[in-house]
Amino acid sequence: MKLPDTAPYFHEIFLKLSAESRTKAFQTRVKDDYRHWDDLKHRLPPEGMTQDEWWLALKSQRQAGRKFIALKDRKGSPFQFGVPDQIAKQLHEIDLGAGGRIGIPEPVTNPDTRDQYLIRSLMDEAITSSQLEGAVTTREVAKNMLRSGRTPQDKSEKMILNNYRTMRRIREIKEQPLTPELILELHRMVTDGTLDKPDAAGRLRREDELITIEDDRGEIMHLPPASSELSERMASMCAFANGVPAEPFVHPAIRAIILHFWLAYDHPFVDGNGRTARALFYWAMLHSDYWLFEYISISDVLQRAPVKYYRAFLHTETDENDLTYFILHQSEVIRKAIDSLHSYISRKTREARDNERILKDMRHLNPRQQVLVGHALRHPGASYTIEGHKLSHDIAYNTARTDLLNLSKQGLFQQGKSGNKMVFYASEVLEQALRQAKA
């Protein structure tokens, strides 16, 4: 990915233009799609304006309502952001879709079904967040590893298992204030057993560990702050995350997005910064009572267009530390992730209705067993283990064992062995029910 051109600074354009041109720019209201200079310079300006006049008009409009935060770049200049209409609209939809109960799909509020959606989200986020950082495996293989509880076979699988455990840990600590110690704990969990320097897990990078972010041609895309500043910067980041000291209001979702950017910008660790940054985003959203984020994967959306994700970082850094670019991108990602959850639940609801005819004589089964039977009907030949059922529904081992053994006693599943593990398959009885339903 090519490094975008640095946008002209407001004062540079101001001094460059004549008094007449400045007046025209300040008095002309122009439509703002919040494009970066790297894109805008290739477009035709509004009629009667030059490219520089157009940019000055946009920059002056963007100054209104600007908020500065404690994050500073390597030169000591602060980062700042605005809330244009595009972001305000996204925030409204996020508040409606992830903070309250209005419009929330019934399956994620139903105690009988919500755990399967929770586990699905934890797995998806663990897998895609790792893949964004270079993990090489398929979702199917990764999910089978997590469900079966088998030992990871390589670094990629270890990254995914670490992320999965970290996401579960975030659910436990969501009420706690953010501290440097907590961030180090999360980093240690994310990187355990995956670093070239094992002792780098859970500690800040040292002076002799120079980090640069480069493209595939060796061009430096980002140079993080010096290691000597990291302790102080992390303390400042935690204060911002906790809303201390009191400051002008920052919308909780924006605070979570900025926290994501902040850790990625500082790059305080030798490796694992991206995964830790996204983990902090989840902590912040859950800490602010966006409870639906237990069921949502943003990395799943990010992975579909990773270049846009990385470009949002670069646009911020190359236009006077304007975080609005990153906030705009991430608010759109959040909305898409919420939409994705709704679509997934709608699809699963349709599948459940399709199976109702087959399951109508199996009302005695508990909800977990019905989900298992429904899956077996849709995936002939699939096998199931006690550990996998336990993980899929977040239940105790004995509960999972009882579920599967009861299905076996009823003749719906048959029981076998794979090594030392009990394995269960759909029986002829269940397969016959499927054939009759299709007839």
Image (tube, rainbow, N blue to C red):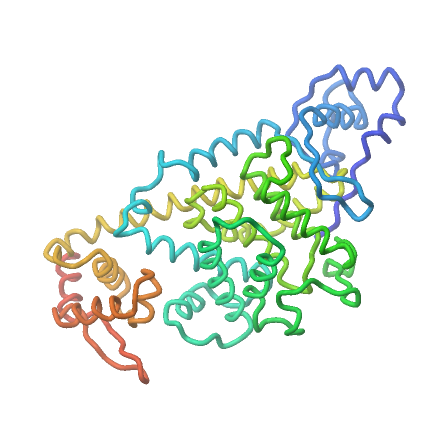
Q: Quadrant of residue 256?
A: top right
- Residue closer to the observer: 364 or 344: 364
Q: Is residue 185 above or below residue 86?
A: below
Which x, y percent locates residue 346? 32, 45
Which residue occupies the extreme front position in the image? 245
Q: Is residue 85 left or right of residue 314?
A: left
Q: What is the x, y in percent for residue 101?
A: 36, 36
Residue 267's place in the image compared with 155, above or below, is above
Q: Residue at x 60, y 58 (%)?
A: 181
Q: Position of residue 304 (x, y in %)?
A: 53, 51
Please identify the quadrant where the C terminus is shown.
bottom left
Asked where in the image residue 377 lies, by quadrant, the reply is: bottom left
Q: Where 249 falls versus 286 (above or below)?
A: above
Q: Pick whichever, 180 or 187, lies toward us.
A: 180
Q: Is residue 80 visible to us here?
A: yes
* Foreground pick, 243 / 433: 243
Residue 92 is situated, as x and y percent measured from the top left of the image, at 49, 31
Residue 221 visible in this rendered orientation of the protein: no
Q: Residue furthest left?
A: 361
- 237 or 8: nearer the eye? 237
Q: What residue do we see at 13% from left, 55% from top?
A: 363
Could you tell me which residue is drawn at 67 percent across and 25 percent down?
Answer: 65
Question: Left or right of 188: which side holds 27?
Answer: right
350 with respect to 2 (left or right) = left
